[in-house]
Image (cartoon, rainbow, N blue to C red):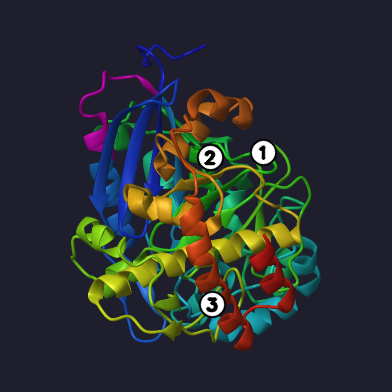
Amino acid sequence: MVSERFTGEPAWAGMDIGTQGVRVTVVDGRGTPLATGSAPLRSRRGEGRGHEQDPEDWWRAAVTACRQATAGLAPGRIRALAVCSTSGTIVLADAAARPVSPALMYDDDRGRPYVERVTAAGQELWDDLAVRIQASWALPKLLWLAENGGLPAGARVLHSADLVTARLAGELTATDSSHALKTGYDSLRERWPLEVMSRLGLPADLFGPVTRPGSPIGEVGAEAAALTGLPEGCGIVAGMTDGCAGQIAAGALTPGSGVSVLGTTLVLKGVSEKLLRDPAGAVYSHRHPGGGWLPGGASNVGAGVLASAFPGRDLAALDEAAARYEPAGAVVYPLTTRGERFPFYRPDAEQVVVGETATEAEHYAALLQGVAYGERLGLASLALLGAPVSGHLALVGGATRSRYWCQLRADVLGMPVRIPRHPEASVGMAVLAASSGRSLDDTAGEMVSHGEQLDPRPDRVARFEQSFRLLVDALTERGYLTTELAAKAVTS
C-alpha cells in the first residue's frame, strides 16, 4: 500500500556523484525525464598521485541538485531514488556520517605501496573473485589512511554514495555490493572477508552492512526532505557505481550487449553468464542485479585528455576542424598521467605517440582518435576473455554531447553504435530505483529508449585501420599488449 504522502503519477529519481559535479534526474514510469538538477564539484590534486575532494561538497552539491530537480514537481510524486558514484572513492566517517578523513578519489594512487601487502593477505580470495588489486582501488588506499592519520574509534569506511544516502536517511545506511567491490567485498559469498581484513590490521567495525543493488536501504528523513525537496519517506534504494549506472541507462544488460561510458575516463562493460578470469587483472566483474556478471574495466584515457590539452576551449568548434584530419598524422595512446588500468594493466605505462601533428586542430583530432583506438582495444580485451559485444555498442557519458566524436568512434570500431535517448548515469539510477522489488531487465526494457543509431562509414573504417594497426604495433613493442590481445584487436 502506497503511503498517503505520495500522490500523482509515480516518478523516480537518480543521482550521479561524478568527478566534476552532481547530477539528479527525475523520470516517469516510461523513463522520460521530468526534471534535472546539477551542481559542480571541485577537486584537489597534490604532488604525485593525490586526488581529493571535500565530502561535505558532495552533500552540498546533492542538496542543490535535488532542489533544482524537485522545484517544479508536484509534491509526493517521487517514490524512490538511487545514487551512483565513482568506483573506488572512499572516506572515513563517524556514526553521524561526518567525515573524519580526506576523501581519496577513484584515481588517487596513494595505495601503491600497499598493493603487494593487500594481494598477499587475500591471494586465494582475489583469485576466486578474478580480481587483481590495483593501487587506485579502495582497499590499498584504506591502508594509506590507516597509516596517515589513523583509524578513529567508531569510524566506518564509506563510498561517496554511502555518505549521501546516510545524510538523506539521517543515519548510516547499508552500502551496495557494487561500490564495495574495490574495498575488498567478497561478491561470491556476499560478505566482507573479515579474516583478510584482520591480517591487514583493519577492524571489523570499519565495514558496515552490504546489500545487493536495487534493495531498499532507508527512507528520506524529515530534515533531508526540507533541504532537498524530496518527499519525506521517499525510498532510498541501494545503487551501483557510475559505470554500472551507465550500463543500466543504456539497457545493455543481456549477453552480447555492451556499453562504453566516456566521461573524464573511459569505462567499457559487457555482460556474461559466468565470472570471467583475466590473467592480466585488467578486467573485473560486478554482479548483475538480475543474475550473471557485468565484466569490464576502467581506462585512464578518456575525455579528460581534452580538458587537459584544451582547457576552456570551444570543443564543438574544434570538432568541426578535426574532421579535416581523418586520420591524423600521429597516432596517440593519450594517457595524461603515468599508468594504465585497462585494456592492459601497466602502472608504468606512459603516453605513446607515433608520428607528428602540424596544427592544433590535427592534435585535437589525434586525441579524439586515440581515445577511440583505446575503446577498440578494450572491446577486443572483453571479446578475448569471453564477453564479446556482438550487437550494438551503446554510448553513454558526457562525450555523447559530441555527435562528431560518436560517429568517429563508430568508424574506428567498425560497428554500429547507439546513443540512448537519455544516456546519463543519473537516469540509470532512476531506472534502478524503479526496479526495486522486480526484474531490472524488465524495468529497463520499459524505461530505456535506444535513441539514435550511427553506422560506421565504410570509407572511414578503411582509413582508420592502418593507423590503429600502427598504434597496436607500438603498444606491443613496448610490452603493453600481449600478442594475443594485439592479434585479437586487429582481427575483431
Label 3 sits on a secondary structure element that is: helix
Question: Of 106 and 4, which appears nearest the observer?
Answer: 106
Residue visible at 39% across and 11% down?
Answer: 4
Circle 3 or circle 2, nearest the eye = 3
Residue 432, horizontal then vertical, whole percent:
52, 34
Label 1 sits on a secondary structure element that is: loop
Q: How many marks?
A: 3
Q: Which residue is mark 3?
A: 471
Q: Is residue 69 magenta?
A: yes
Range shown magenta:
66-78
Q: CA distance from mark 3 to mark 1?
A: 31 Å
Q: Which residue is mark 2?
A: 248
Residue 41, horizontal then vertical, whole percent:
27, 58
Q: Which residue is mark 1?
A: 254
Q: Amino acid at mark 3?
A: Leu
Q: Classify residue 57 as left or right of residue 200.
A: left
How crowded pointer 2 is (Cα within 10 Å; few <14, some 14-19, many 20+) is rated as many
Q: Is residue 26 magenta?
A: no
Question: Of 108 and 63, which appears nearest the observer?
Answer: 108
Q: Amino acid at mark 2?
A: Ile
Q: Which mark is residue 404?
A: none
Q: Is residue 258 above or below residue 71?
A: below
Q: Classify residue 430 as left or right of residue 482.
A: left
Residue 317, horizontal then vertical, whole percent:
20, 58
Residue visible at 35% across and 12% down?
Answer: 7
Question: Of 482 and 90, which appears nearest the observer?
Answer: 482
Label 2 sits on a secondary structure element that is: helix
Q: Is residue 271 above or below residue 186?
A: above
Q: Amino acid at mark 1?
A: Thr
Mark 3 or mark 1, earlier in chain: 1
